[in-house]
Image (cartoon, helix red, strand yellow):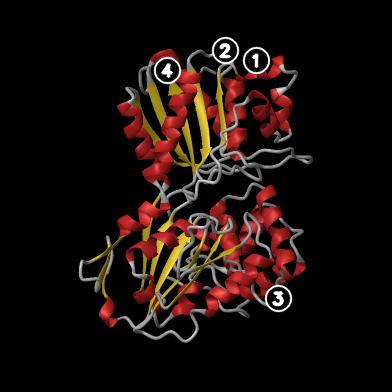
Amino acid sequence: MTDPHRAIAMDLVQAALDAVDPFAAVCRALRLDADGRTLQVVGGPTLDLDQVDRIVVVGGGKAVLAMARAVESILDPQRIHDGRVIAKEAPPPQRPEKIVVEQGAHPLPDDRSLQATQRMMGLLQGLGPADLVLALISGGGSSLMTLPVPDVGLDQLERLGQQLLAAGVPIHAINTVRKHLSRIKGGQLAAAAAPARTVALVLSDVVGSPLDVIASGPTAPDPTTFDDALEVLARHGLDQVPGPVMRWLSEGAAGKHAETPKPSDALFTRVHNQIIGSNALAAEAVLRRAAALGFNSLLLSTFVEGEAREVGRVHAALLREVCASARPLSRPACLVLGGETTVTLSDSPGRGGRNQELALAAALALQGLPEVMLVALATDGNDGPTDAGGALCDGTTVARARALGLDPHDHLRRNDAYPLFEALGDLLITGPTGTNVNDLTLLLAF
């Protein structure tokens, strides 16, 4: 893997991350008039702040720290009555002035998430119709904002989460289950804020950006039901979930527990959800930068889903097509794909994440192909339980691994891509990026 090729790849990665910087995204979405009395939500309502009694800021997710700082850069912190958000990392010195930032856990919640969510939801008690709630939502919010139903404990939610992830359940299906075991997800944060007006700024980490799925849709109506949650478990053969979980869902399906708020609920007439950043925006930024660097560039899809290793093989086939027939582009070519794959874990999984697994599967299919590179990136900078944001591979990856005594087929079989790419120096290490808009795969033919 040549240094010039790697430098180009990292240039494109940085372009993607810059395009979905959460601070900048909030600043683009909110505009305060020069007199400081009118707040416009770009693409949404215009709010007369003289008619607002209290402004309360709440939210959670991997990008929420920067989002909260952006709100305070637009609104005088003294205009904010109260605020509390939940982030994955501890707040650095440049923390917000008025909005309290608490730390939770991801991808599975812990007691910090629970306690912080209880305190955050407490800010919504007793609000009136003249109050305004600004909700800051980004990927990771499902775990960071956790308030389980009374009969289900955190340990049971953790066990369920591990089972869902290990079974390779897609995120929208995972969130269908989560919403029906929660008192905040599936529109229930908005319900708790009523009759106050709620404006939610949402940084999407979900394929297609459905509002009811991002962070399990705390401010969006929920079209799914208890029956749907039970169907997810059945479809994936999850018949050993914790007893209280199955009991609550079954009782809900029988009408013994209230459903989440549905699209027809009148409370949503006072709720506005605004997508301020997405995978598509990141992908389009890569296209612009690639074109500026002289590449023929094309966005193929932002709806990529499926088993990571299978998707990796398909991506490798696309690169082979470019090299063999100049379709769909001639060299130098940059094909961009976005979405989120899943990994079904083996009985004794190693270390890695979906993007590393995708890259390893692609490397096996790219053996010997010259002047190509595949970059698989998790935009939050963490791939699975590792500190890598993904990995890079090319036509020499497999040969270089074997020269070190590593068996790429065995590492793939054991979901153990991290040690292989670490030995090669081909892990994509960005550090936590402060944003999260799904995954990107860049296919480069030089």
Residue 399 is tagged as 1
Q: Is residue 18 left or right of residue 317?
A: left
**Dot 4, crowdedness within 10 Å: few (<14), some or many (≥20)?**
some
Q: Residue at x 47, y 21 (%)?
A: 5
Q: Are marks 2 and 4 in contact (CB under 8 Å)?
A: no
Q: Residue at x 58, y 57 (%)?
A: 88
Can you tell which quarter of the image residue 245 is in? bottom right
Residue kind at label 3, given as amino acid type: Asp
Few, some or many residues within 10 Å of mark 1 (<14, 14–19, 20+)? some
Residue 109 point in image, percent of width and height = 65, 61
Comparing labels 2 and 4, the label whose residue is closer to the camera? 4
Q: Residues within 10 Å of mark 3 (few under 14, many from 20)?
A: few
Q: Which mark is residue 446?
A: 4
Mark found first going from the N terminus, 2 or 3? 3
**Picture quarter with the N terminus:** top right
Q: Amino acid under label 2?
A: Gly
- Which circle marks residue 151 in the picture? 3
Cα gap from disc 1 to disc 4, whole angstroms: 20 Å
Q: Which residue is mark 2?
A: 368
Q: Nearer the viewer, residue 104 or 218?
A: 104
- Sequence-wise, which precedes: disc 1 or disc 3? 3
Check whether the beta carbons of the residues at disc 1 and disc 2 lie within 8 A of each other. Answer: yes
Residue appearing at x 54%, y 76% in the figure: 121
**CA gap, disc 2 and disc 3:** 56 Å
C-alpha span from label 1 to label 3: 54 Å
Q: Secondary structure at mark 2?
A: loop
> Between residues 363 and 61, which one lies in front from this camera angle?
61
Tell me which numbered mark, 3 or 4, is placed earlier along the sequence. Answer: 3
The one nearer the camera, 339 or 114, is 114
Percent of width and height locating residue 188: 51, 73
Amino acid type shown at disc 4: Phe
